[in-house]
Amino acid sequence: MAFHEEYQKDAGKLQHTRDFHHPFTPYAIQETFMETVYQVLENGKVGILESPTGTGKSLSLICGALTWLRDHKAKAFEDGLNWDNSKFSKSDEPEWIIEQAKARRRRELLRNREDMEARLAKIRAKEKAQREKYLKGDQSFKRRKVEIANHGDDEEQFVLDDYDSDREQSGSSTSGLSAKTLEMMSRIGMGPVALADEEEEVEDEIKIFYCSRTHSQLTQFINELRRVQFPPSIRDENTNPNGTEDLKHLTLGSRRNLCINPKVNKLTSLTAINERCSELQQTSTPKEDKCVFLPNKENETLVNTFRDHSLATIRDIEDMGELGKQIGICPYYASRAAIKPAEIVTLPYPLLLQKSARDALGISLKGHVVIIDEAHNLMDAISSIYGVEVTLRQLKRARAQLGVYLQKFRNRLKGKNRVYVAQVVRVIDSLAGYVESRLALPKSDGIVSDKDLLSGKGVDQINLFKLIKYLQDSKLARKVESYALHTETQTPQTSHSLQKSSEQISSTPVLHHIASLLSVLTNPSKEGRLFYTLSPVPTAPDLATLKYHLLDPSPHFQDLVSSARAVVLAGGTMSPMSDYTSHLFPYLLPSNITTLSCGHVIPKENLLAWNLSKGPTGQTFDFTFKNRQNWEMIDDFGRALLNICSVVPDGVVVFFPSYTSLASIVERWEVVPPSTASTQQQKSLLARLATKKQLFQETKTASVDTILSSYAQAVSEGKGALLFSVVGGKMSEGINFSDGLGRCVVIVGLPFPNINSAEWKAKMAYIESATIERLSKEVSSSADSESTPKFQITVSDKSAKTLSREEIASKGKEEAREFYENACMRAVNQSIGRAIRHQNDYAAIVMVDRRFEGESVRGKLPGWIKNGLVDGSGGLAFGNLMGRLGGFFRGRK
């Protein structure tokens, strides 16, 4: 990498003189982190930054990025160029005229800034007065009524609108919108008109787009934003040198989060909400049924009011919805007007990572900064966004729903509707027929052939492009699903069928999945593959699945990277980082990537990391698939855990490789050893563990909140608690086992994915071939005197080497194997990171498997864990661990 720094707390402190306006006295590693963020943004690079949970990563991101932003804007203002030098550099005017123009532009910028700050200050004062009034007991305030009359559940709403060839060829999903609506949409950055005029518009003020996985994580980040203060970026002689300027922040969400129309937001799926919203904007919709909250020319002042209020104070997504209700304007659409003047925009993964979502929101990333937090699962998130999955049960349900729908409305379907609905039926029958034909096969999964998938009767005569467009434009999916729900609610049902219905309506209509699947088939690419997977439940064969999986996320992410000025990927457990450099950014030069792995803020003596290779009786721990029924080893691990629980206070969390291995080991530990003439009735290992600590076990179906609540209560009552969990399970990510909840984390084995699955075989084959192709393209010169042709290439260690074709092929296999190992270790690192959540926390990390002693595995651990790992612990007897654990916890509170 151009800059790789593995910074440890005691490895020497870097000196930084820049003021990052941190609300507290920052740790040395926070200074390093903030400076790295600043330099990545300043130099327009990609940064991959790791800082363990509890080290103040969010505040460091905020302070580093926003300090740079204010500095950058101040410099641009001082230059008087409004971030665009082109108009002056191309001018033939005398220099004094150019200087006057610059001075005039500076005055305009200053006046505009003062006007905006004055408006926002007035709003802040008004909102402060309202809060004080509320706290004094006066809860009355004016609020526009959002209730809309309900016109009843008329079955007419389920009838398809006429669909003709003219609409097929129009190519615009907004062709039904009125001229006034389109005009207003373009004005606030909505719709195709805005996109067409994008190049003619004034460039956005540079801003930061901050993205995380969920709105709850964004809310935590927004709370951190409220802590910081920064000096103004634009100053004059009247500016207080010690003054601050409030941040202009905006949070964005989907219609599900922001819709305030009761007739729309009550719908069960995001797709249904999106389609209903679109319908209410069509010219064919009666005036009395249109959405009264949609921005238009008449309520433009409300849009401006919403814009100013949303920027005046730092709000989360719930605040935005409430603001829309109070003002009486749609927050989903009105928030677009606040994007350009905002300094930092927060939004969840799907709205940023998917280009269609960015276009729908009117977001342009050109020249802006993108920060993606919790980025350890970024590649999986991209694959999930562009992936498609549908079960045989869903296909059968969709077919049955279409049957019910046709039985009711067949005679009312005309022209194209009748033709296309019949085609949809044939496609579903073909897909379901293919999956059913796989049920008798001995293999549990495999790669799907496109031709076999659509080999049903008459399917080869269907124009899939037109059918996909019909499914997108006709709203067939929602109307069929809604009518099915309508008929089910009118018919008495058993509790089982009601539960089954509720499972279905809470998700996206199946016909949308089918449309996505057809889109994949009509746009084949080497980056993705279709797979089938048989049901893991023998009694439910209809859970067999068709899945499209994205093997390579880099092309979809490249569009974002090429548009943005700089991109920062941050997380608590980004190690091992080679996946990002090799597989997410294979097109970037090493000099354009900066990586940083920070140490922890805890003192070194607050962490004990140990590789346990042998148990109390000397059994070697090797939790591989072939040893899954090695009962002697499993029993010895139980005895080891029994000893650990005798020494470690409070809570112990054990992460197993899979739910299957957890169930198998617990079942073994429930076995009561046979008693002999010389011994009394013995207890099972599980019963003996229960005498040391109260037992809890994660399952696929049990409520996480319920388990955690009971576990925490047992710890707080001083009983001690032992929690069995799974790497990659519900407890391994986003759960805080701080202080007594996680005094010891035990990692059992290495959770390698199933390398024999069709999906992983295809993934590794793709990485191997892509690596060979990439290395071959990097040929810089060829040898001319060797009998075996050789090439001068740049390999992943960034040094020039001469490799033969055989060596290139070997390198491809090595890259695939590396990716496979990294998938395992990233999951391990994420589980380890559940403990030690703040500066004064302390815990022991015990990794139970001889393979943790190998350099290829240890090298992929986070730096702070490697720093606390006892050298040679894997070769020591079990008694040494007990001695170190006893000393570690002795005397600690």
Image (spheres, helix red, strand yellow):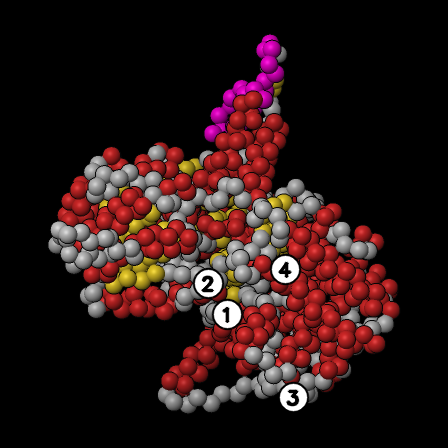
Q: Mark 1 is on which residue type?
A: Ile
Q: Mark 3 is on which residue type?
A: Ala
Towards the viewer: 356 or 520: 520
Q: Which mark is residue 218?
A: 2
Q: Which mark is residue 149?
A: 3
Q: Earlier in the sequence, mark 3 or mark 1?
A: 3
Q: Earlier in the sequence, mark 4 or mark 1?
A: 1
Towards the viewer: 185 or 145: 145
Q: Earlier in the sequence, mark 1 or mark 2?
A: 2
Report the Cα–Cα distance between label 1 and label 2: 9 Å
- Which label sits in the foreground, 4 or 2? 4
Q: Within the magenta stretch, is there residue 793?
A: yes
Span colored in magenta: 785-805
Residue 810: x %, y % from top left: 53, 26
Q: Is residue 223 left or right of residue 319?
A: left
Q: Are marks 1 and 2 in contact (CB under 8 Å)?
A: yes
- Which label sits in the foreground, 3 or 4? 4
Task: Tell me which corner region of the image, top left, top right, bottom left or bottom right, holds residue 327.
Answer: bottom right
Q: Which residue in the protein does label 4 denote?
A: 392
- Which label sits in the foreground, 3 or 1? 3
Residue depicted at x 26% and y 50%: 638
Quarter of the image containing the C terminus? bottom left
Towards the viewer: 552 or 336: 552
Is residue 171 shown to the viewer in this render? yes
Residue depicted at x 58% and y 53%: 534
Residue depicted at x 23% and y 49%: 639
Q: Which residue in the protein does label 1 denote?
A: 317
- Which label sits in the foreground, 2 or 3? 3
